[in-house]
Image (tube, grey):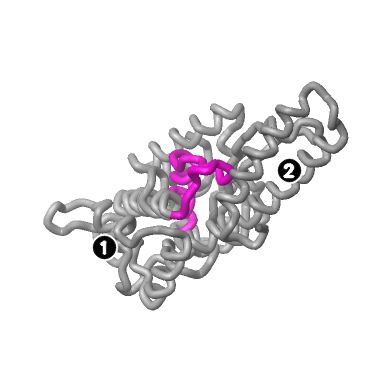
Amino acid sequence: MYDVDTEINFNDPWYSSKRSDEENFKRLVLALNKVETGRKVISKATQKAAQQGLTLFDVVAIGDGSLTDTTLIRRFSASNPANVMYETRSKVYLNKHLKTLDAILDFAHELTHFTYREAFNPYDSRFHLKDFIKSTVEGRGGEVDAYMVECKVLQEILPGVGFARSNCQKVYDQKMGSLSKELGIAEFYKVGRHFDDLKKDLDKFAVNEKDLPQASGGDALFISSAWGLPYPVAAVKEYANIMDRVCKNDQNRITLMQDRIGRNPASIDSNKDTQDFRLMFEDFKSRCDKFTSK
């Protein structure tokens, strides 16, 4: 528990330039620690940060929007482009323009992404659109999970009228008397007027509609702040954006490998280099034929 000597007003702005960034975040931590789901969110996120040798306040930052940014770092040397190492790092940004209650909910939402969302490797040949959409929407730590946590926090902080007036009612099963991930999945796969375009994109990337049976043309309530589109549609845009960068990076790596072979035509390693290059190029062709870097 963190000591904050002032009472928190949910309607006040959560961020103040008169306080340090850490002090602003500590006030949200204090509020989350007052309810069961919030305590769990803070505890798990703190543990995840500690695994990287960091504190919770090392992995959060002030932003103009709320998002969890995960960066894949790929390392290889120009002298040996075939040997690649990967590392992922995540940072949570919280919208500084929010009122305190909205900031608390956004914070719980983004910390769920930070703690549970599984990192992906877009350089892996098994990185496909179908899996990316499923991971984004319904996967562990994805949008549905994060929204369910957000709603649980709201339900515990403002039971009754406060909860009833929120969109959380869309994922609340009246018969079961609890939040429903099944209802959440159905809502997050509604794309409204984008449904026909989504089907075209799925076909373009060889994704069968049966692989995403929940996708529908129902009214889209949940919109990605990053793309201004329903989440499945936004996931397609994000996938294409990621793969475009990946393919450009792989082109550079292939060029380095060509240079290495050209500089050492008679070396002991030339046969291995040639084999590595052939495998690298075949992998590049199979993954990048649909993107601008081909």
Q: Specify the label residue 169 is tagged with.
A: 1
Residue at 39% in and 69% down: 199
Query: Can you say whether 246 is above or below 124 in the image?
Result: below
**Foreground: 40 or 171?**
171
Query: Can you say whether 100 is above or below 56 in the image?
Result: below
Give coordinates of residue 173: x percent, y percent. Answer: 19, 57
Residue at 45% in and 51% down: 132
Q: Amino acid at mark 2?
A: Arg
Residue at 44% in and 40% down: 116
Quadrant showing the C terminus: bottom right
Number of on-image labels: 2
Closer to the eye: label 2 or 1? 2
Figure quadrant of residue 222: bottom left
Magenta region? 102-129
Note whether residue 256 is visible. yes
**Foreground: 17 or 93?**
93
Figure quadrant of residue 189: bottom left
Q: Specify the label residue 264 is tagged with.
A: none
Number of residues whose C-alpha sits closer than 10 Å to that of mark 2, classed few (under 14), some (14–19) or many (20 or more): many
Q: Specify the label residue 253 is tagged with.
A: 2
Q: Amino acid at mark 1?
A: Gln
> As drawn, which residue projects farthest toward the top?
268
Number of residues whose C-alpha sits closer than 10 Å to that of mark 1, classed few (under 14), some (14–19) or many (20 or more): some
Q: Dot 1 lies on which element?
A: helix
In the image, is residue 107 part of the stretch drawn in magenta?
Answer: yes
Among the two numbered marks 2 and 1 on one chain, the one whose residue lies closer to the N terminus: 1
Note whether residue 162 is visible. no
Give coordinates of residue 67: x percent, y percent. Answer: 54, 54
